[in-house]
Image: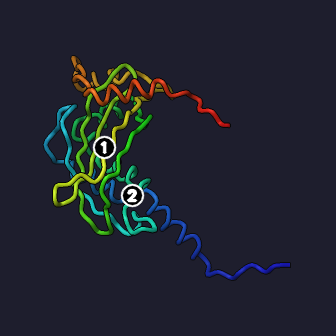
């Protein structure tokens, strides 16, 4: 009968906790949110600039920013942006939630350990179903490393509601800017995608 390997009491629990803190960047999110508390307010469609470093737990086997971790780090731009443009406060007051409902990502340049990147986050507009936001990371030479277009769903009482329901709490007469052609093309292409997908 196999014998269990002895372990120090609490070591496994400590390691699991430490791993959990690395899995989602809670501390970095709090830091970014605190940084914008007294920052100038943004309009609903203004861009937010933030600065970040690629840390050792962000990398993969090739010692560069992991592609999945890139998506997580983009949260560090969107949530502080929502504080600056008022959508975070309006969502809390109105009982709304937000969820990412789709994304298209381009990876063009490696981001390596301890490298600093500038992140730009900008809402592009909305339609009857989604908000559309683009984000990008840039190195210190001014070259773009990656770019994401995502659509966000506004949720209330566990159901999607039109983004206008949330945005009018901030600007009662809000209208969406015209979405760029490439964004409209993505929306149209995605509408042809079968759901649910084929499994065989």
Residue 37 left/right relative to 8: left
Helix, strand, or loop for circle 1? helix
Residue 118 screen position, x and y as percent: 21, 54
Return the residue at label 1. Answer: 78
Return the residue at label 2. Answer: 25
**Is residue 184 in view from this perspective?**
yes
Query: With respect to residue 121, does 53 lie above or below?
Result: below
In the image, 87 versus 122, the foreground residue is 122
Give the residue at x 18% y 36%: 46
Furthest residue in direction left, as rendered: 40
**Is residue 79 in view from this perspective?**
no
Give the residue at x 32% y 21%: 164
Residue 67 screen position, x and y as percent: 41, 55
Classify mark 1: residues with Cα within 10 Å, few (<14), some (14-19) or many (20+): many
Sequence-earlier tag: 1 or 2: 2
Query: With respect to residue 182, does 10 lie above or below?
Result: below
Residue 96 screen position, x and y as percent: 40, 30
């Amino acid at each position: 009968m196999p014998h269990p390997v002895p372990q120090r009491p609490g070591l496994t629990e400590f390691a699991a906790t430490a791993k959990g803190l690395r899995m989602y960047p809670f501390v970095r999110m709090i830091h970014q949110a605190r940084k914008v508390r007294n920052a100038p307010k943004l309009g609903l469609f203004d861009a937010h600039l933030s600065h970040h470093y690629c840390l050792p737990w962000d990398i993969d086997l090739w010692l560069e920013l992991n592609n999945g971790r890139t998506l997580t780090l983009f949260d560090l731009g969107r949530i502080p942006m929502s504080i600056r443009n008022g959508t975070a406060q309006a969502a809390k007051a109105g009982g709304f939630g937000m969820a990412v409902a789709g994304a298209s990502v381009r990876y063009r340049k490696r981001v390596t350990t301890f490298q600093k990147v500038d992140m730009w986050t900008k809402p592009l507009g909305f339609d009857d179903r989604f908000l559309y936001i683009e984000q990008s990371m840039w190195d210190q030479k001014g070259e773009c490393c990656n770019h994401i277009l995502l659509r966000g769903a506004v949720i209330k009482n566990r159901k999607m509601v039109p983004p206008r329901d949330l945005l009018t709490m901030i600007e009662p007469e809000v209208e969406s800017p015209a979405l760029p052609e490439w964004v409209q093309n993505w929306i149209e292409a995605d509408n042809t995608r079968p759901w649910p997908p084929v499994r065989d």
